[in-house]
Amino acid sequence: MWSIHNKQYDFTNFKHPGGPLALSLARDRDCTELFESYHPFSSHDRLKQILAKYEVVGPLEGALPITPACIVEKQMNSVVEAGKKEDKDMPTIITETTTTTNGSSIFDWDTKSEFAKELKAVVGPILKESGTKANGERWAQLAIMLVAVLICLFPFVKGEWWTIVAFPIAYWVLCVNVYHDASHMALSHDWRVNQYATYLFPWFSSPFTWYHQHIIGHHVYTNLEADPDVHHGTVLWRYDATSPWFSWHKWQSFYFIAVWSVVCFSLNFVFDVAFMIRRSYQHVVKMIPVSDERMRWHIAGRFFAFAVTYIWPFCMPQFSWTKAIMFAIIPHTIFSCCFAFFSQVNHLIEETHGQYNKDWYKHQVITSHSFAADSVFWFIFSGGLNFQIEHHLFPGVNHIHLRKIQPIVQQLCEKHNVPYNISSTGLEAIQKYLKHLAKMAIDPNQLEESVSG
């Protein structure tokens, strides 16, 4: 079953244009937000006609109700701890099914806000004209990036020292510009290109796991308790007011680079293993149903990813043990820091922390942070992630088109009094992140004592 706007559907025999993967990610869960965010400009009447063909009416004999893997029984008190005014409409308990335990919805899709209506009305025609997937310019950029990787690859395998830095940077640039758009079905209109392109980058993350963490979880519940990203590494560091505080957190503004260096290792292997065991990601996103054979292929893929990341240097006869260790550790550390930079500054600043709005479009704006909108360098190096607000509003749109709509989105936010968080440079963005990290490093008990005092 698939649940959309509190109605049940059976899409088993539906040939989705986005391919079987798009349907499988939404199976056996409330996929209202996924459905809405990936069809923002589709004809409402057309979608209604299609849905009507597959709606299941009446009792479901022999079927189980759609339930989350785990209800997150954590109070939404981050707004209070951040010292901001609590939103009276904020739900106190969040689940993967987008409802609270009392049945109220996290996001209100029945009331179409003027902001959401005008946003789609203005941006829609622009993207209809330019397209939503990679265009000729984008494919040319990706070709140049691929050439850069190939130039570095063979000297890297041979052990030339200059490639220990050059290869991971070149590989990161290609990876973030291909993998991220492909995982959002935004690289090509052909679902096969999108699906298979995600498997070209073993340094990054398992696509299977990434879909759960990023597509199903993070993009729907950005910065809320049902967002898997707010539960990552909370023992090592504290970036959310709802997370427990440990004494070593007071130094996190100084050792954050050390944490950044193991982020991709954790995504690739540590969190992945936990996901396989629990069959849910961070207890908030349940795993889609898969066969035992599919699971065996996944495990084999993880062994392959570990081998091409860390084992191959020790198989090179011309490498000393010292050189093998350096080529196994340093490149992936650089790659991991590149990923961590953009995953952190895009959502973890004081202005986006503890925010919530029942309007899904407004929520995506106020919990995201864009930066350096005019910089070609940051656009290429981040894979367009510097347009984070626009990306969260329209995840199925290739990043090449976000530069065109960014000033329009910002103007509409100003018109409708929706806070638009943007930094003019990458340096300003990291400064905001470090400021937030320093604030979260303070013992909350000391904050309470100072406030009461």
Image (cartoon, helix red, strand yellow):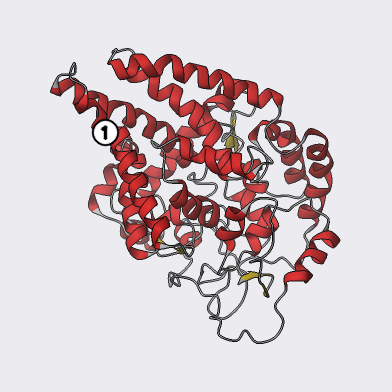
Residue 101 in percent (x, y) is at: 53, 78
Residue 257 in percent (x, y) is at: 32, 34
Where, by quadrant of the figure, is residue 133 drawn?
Answer: top right
Q: Quadrant of the N terminus?
A: bottom right
Q: Quadrant of the C terminus?
A: bottom left
Image side of residue 150 versus residue 60, left or right: left
Tell me the residue at 40%/58% (across/down): 293
The answer to whether residue 319 is visible is yes
Image side of residue 323 versus residue 129, left or right: left
Residue 121 in percent (x, y) is at: 84, 48
Total marks drawn? 1
Tell me the residue at 19%/20% (across/down): 323
Residue 334 in percent (x, y) is at: 35, 28
The answer to whether residue 369 is visible is no
Where, by quadrant of the figure, is residue 127 drawn?
Answer: top right
Image side of residue 394 versus residue 213, left or right: right
Q: Which residue is outermost to the left? A: 321
Tell me the residue at 49%/44% (across/down): 349
* Kind of residue sitting beneath label 1: Tyr
- Residue denoted by label 1: 310
179 up-or-down from 302: above or below:
above
Image side of residue 55 versus residue 167, left or right: right
144 up-or-down from 187: above or below:
above
Q: Residues within 10 Å of mark 1 (few under 14, many from 20)?
A: some
Label 1: which secondary element: helix
Tell me the residue at 35%/41% (across/down): 263
147 up-or-down from 385: above or below:
above
- Along the viewing direction, whichever of 188 and 283 lies nearer the viewer: 188
